[in-house]
Image (cartoon, grey):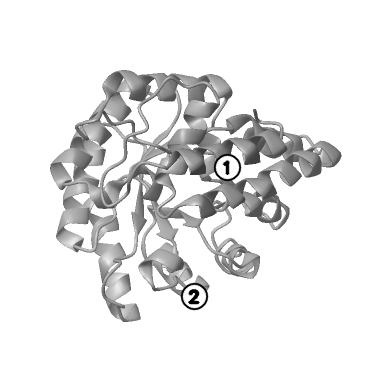
Amino acid sequence: MMIKFKGIIPPVSIILNEQGKLDTKGMALVIDHLIDAGVDGLFFLGSGGEFTQMSAAERKEVAEFTTNYVNKRVPVLIGTGSSNTREAILLSKHAEEIGADGIVVINPYYWQLTEVNLLHHFGDIANSVQLPVLLYNFPNLTGQDLSPELVLELANQHDNIVGIKETVESVSHIRDIIFTVKAEHKDFCVFSGFDDHLLNTLTLGGDGAICASANFAPEVAIGTYQAYVAKDFEKAIELHRTLALLPTIYKLDSPFINVVKEAMKLRGLDISTHVLPPSGKLSEEKVKELASILKSVKLL
């Protein structure tokens, strides 16, 4: 029986030393901290996990260490997306071999694909493993949206395509995914990718969030989700007001991977904030701005 993914699953920042190598001590610290905070799973090698800046060998190393270190304490999702279908299949098979609980697959991010080619891309990956597959829709970065009709077709064709991460600006897209796909596949899980869409997603019938703020303020997203499930809507709304303000920090740099790591450090995690190029170190001035924003929402 496949795991039903739900709740708050951080897209975990990968901790690296100054040489750009995996910092296993720092990574272990982050994993333990997030599990202790009560997350419902961990997603490694997403956009914030710097997968686009890593070689296939580096991605395998990260996937193997993190999956082994979590050791089934919570479900582990591994990002295996690539602009190269063969590489995505290779990484997906590796994730299955090391004992991951599922994979998250973004659409290719160079060519705009026809619907037929998109169906083949995701279908070939899904057919290569028995693991649950979550689609990853991030049109701002890929340049191509996954339509509700396409997602439904994929869910119809492949029993192991079980959900989607919706990193989209419009809540109407999340609504249409929920109403279109869940109508035929009630266990299909729908996660918001942006922090400020969590409550909207839940009220529409979605399943949670895979949001960056869960790295540095897991208690806010987890608290919102748990309050909603407990029908304590007043608390859920109060916490969500904080959650809705957090995306302002992402405007401090692009990519904002460095911002998230600096926020983790500001909130007490003793980690290296090194990022892989073309990302760079966040300036001292920007770190001060970040601290100011976190103070304004009482997270410092």
Separation (CA) of disc 2 from disc 1: 42 Å
On screen, residue 212 versus residue 134, left or right, reads right
Residue 128 at x, y percent in the picture: 22, 53
Disc 2, SS: helix
User: Residue, x 67% and y 34% (percent of image)?
Assistant: 295
User: Residue, x 22% and y 35% (percent of image)?
Assistant: 20
Q: Outermost residue toward the right?
A: 234
Question: What is the quadrant of residue 23 in the picture?
Answer: top left
Residue 42 lies, with reference to residue 130, above or below; the image says above
Mark yes or no: residue 148 visible: yes
Is the residue marked by circle 1 packed among few (<14), some (14-19), or many (20+) residues within 10 Å?
some
The numbered mark at residue 214 is none
Residue 280 at x, y percent in the picture: 33, 46
User: Residue, x 46% and y 34% (percent of image)?
Assistant: 262
> Which quadrant is the C terminus positioned in?
top right
Q: Nearer the viewer, residue 211 or 103?
A: 211
Residue 251 at x, y percent in the picture: 53, 54
Mark yes or no: residue 80 visible: no
Q: Mark 2 points at which residue?
A: 149
Disc 1, SS: helix
Q: Outermost residue toward the front?
A: 285
> Which quadrant is the N terminus positioned in?
top left
Q: Name the residue under label 1.
A: 289
Residue 220 lies, with reference to residue 52, above or below; the image says above
User: What type is the residue that disc 1 sits on?
Assistant: Glu
Question: What is the quadrant of residue 214 in the picture?
Answer: top right
On screen, residue 73 versus residue 274, left or right, reads right
User: What type is the residue that disc 2 sits on?
Assistant: Glu
Is tag 2's residue or tag 1's residue first in the polypeptide sequence?
Answer: 2
- Which tag is nearer the camera, tag 2 or tag 1? 1
